[in-house]
Amino acid sequence: DAKTTQPPSMDCAEGRAANLPCNHSTISGNEYVYWYRQIHSQGPQYIIHGLKNNETNEMASLIITEDRKSSTLILPHATLRDTAVYYCIAVNTGTASKLTFGTGTRLQVTL
Amino acid sequence: KAGVTQTPRYLIKTRGQQVTLSCSPISGHRSVSWYQQTPGQGLQFLFEYFSETQRNKGNFPGRFSGRQFSNSRSEMNVSTLELGDSALYLCASSGDRVHEQYFGPGTRLTVT
């Protein structure tokens, strides 16, 4: 699976959009981009995934650049409950199911 | 749909003892994966079960074992506990998209 790089921390004001970047410059054609988050003391939570088209669900939007070397997770109206560590991973869905998280981005949503 | 449940939520054991943790997946999910999470090592994959068979395994010693029942519920067992086994043990279930995993709240194991 390709390596991903994320900023260690970000702040966002409540009600504003949180844009979390992820670099995956060595991603291969059959690797998907997956996003998870982990709120303190809870299990990780699946957010969204995509291959090359932009994706949206009830939690977030995922924007993947045309060359697929980077992506951005967008939380359109961040709330205090979105404070968490966000993990971006590149996954070859034909391989084993194990997830390997890096250090992620710690998002702090403030009043 | 009910989420993934894990029991117990907290456990304190003594070195040398053994422990069994339980996981009930989301209804309809046949894959159950187990992870260990510690502050120093992050999230580490233990093993995955699918239809009662271990499908994948991480790099943990043989003291860590698991099984899955016909109703997809899974258990993991750690024998001869060591202090370093203190961790949050997470179970995750998935359906057809195995990387879209739904995690339980975890069992926090403390070994003294």
Image: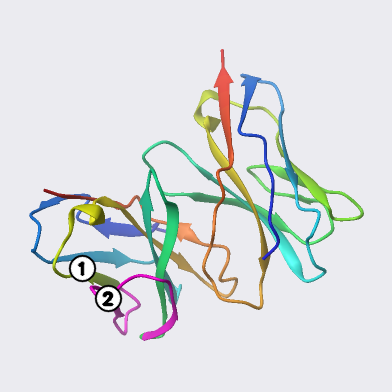
Of the two numbered discs 1 and 2 on the same chain, state the one appearing first in sequence.
2
Front in this rendered view, residue B6 or A102: A102
User: In this view of the protein, can residue B44 be seen by the observer?
Assistant: yes
User: Furthest residue to the right?
Assistant: A66
| CA–CA distance in space, label 1 to label 2 | 6 Å
Q: Position of residue A11 (x, y in %)?
A: 63, 22
Amino acid carrying mark 1 in the image:
Val
Q: Position of residue A12 (x, y in %)?
A: 65, 21
At horizontal 80% and vertical 67% (from top left) the residue drawn is: A28
According to the image, label 1 marks what residue? B78
Front in this rendered view, residue B78 or B59: B59
Q: Secondary structure at mark 2?
A: strand
- Quarter of the rendering containing residue A76: top right
Vertical placement of residue B102 versus B72, above or below: above
Q: Position of residue B8 (x, y in %)?
A: 19, 55
At horizontal 68% and vertical 48% (from top left) the residue drawn is: A57
Estimate how packed mark 2 is, as few (under 14), some (14 to 19) or many (20 or more) residues with alpha carbons within 10 Å: some
According to the image, label 2 marks what residue? B65
Instruction: Name the disc covering residue B38, or none.
Output: none
Amino acid carrying mark 2 in the image:
Ser
Chain letter, disc 1 residue: B
Q: Point out the stretch of residues depicted in magenta.
A: B53-73
